[in-house]
Image: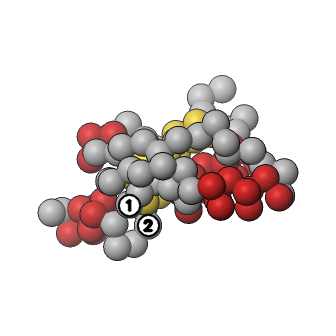
Amino acid sequence: MIKTKVLFVCTENSSRSQMAEGFLRHLAGQHFDVFSGGAQPTQLNPVAGEVMKEIGIDISSQHSKACGHARLVGRDSPLLRPGTQFFNFFLHGD
């Protein structure tokens, strides 16, 4: 089975994109290769890890990763948060 590749992109790749990666991997990881990244990666927000742990999803092994425009190539479904430089790039081409 060929899995669809999904990339969640946010500015710092510290909370929302990390949580989205964890949710999709937990709920449907057998169907998707899931990744996340950011334009200006920092570190995993510990609060995000705690919140996910409360609902039974462990994202403690995940870490913030850089995500240049080149990394979006080859992803079937890059999911971009409005307002990020990546969203603006896809929307306006600059």
Q: Which is more toward the observer, 58 or 9?
A: 58
Q: Secondary structure at mark 2?
A: loop
Q: Residue at x 27, y 68 (%)?
A: 88
Give the labeled residue for mark 1: 11
Q: Local crowd at mark 2 within 10 Å, few (<14), some, or many (≥20)?
A: some
Amino acid under label 1?
Answer: Thr
Q: Quadrant of the C terminus?
A: bottom left
The percent position of residue 5, horizontal first and vertical second, equals 52, 39
Q: In the rendered image of this protein, does residue 40 appear above or below residue 5?
A: below
At a point 32% along the width and 53% down the height, the residue shown is 39
Q: Is residue 89 left or right of residue 63?
A: left
Label count reads 2
Tell me, for residue 38, which label it has, or none: none
Q: Amino acid at mark 2?
A: Arg
Q: Residues within 10 Å of mark 1 (few under 14, many from 20)?
A: many
Q: Residue furthest top?
A: 1
Task: From the top left corner, tell me how far across and down residue 47 is, in percent.
Answer: 65, 61
Residue 48 appears anywhere in the view: yes
Instruction: Tell me: 27 left or right of 91.
Output: right
Q: Are marks 1 and 2 in contact (CB under 8 Å)?
A: yes
**Element type where label 1 sits in the image:** loop
Up the image or down, 75 lies above or below 24; here it is: above
Q: Look at mark 2 in the image and give the residue it sits on.
A: 81
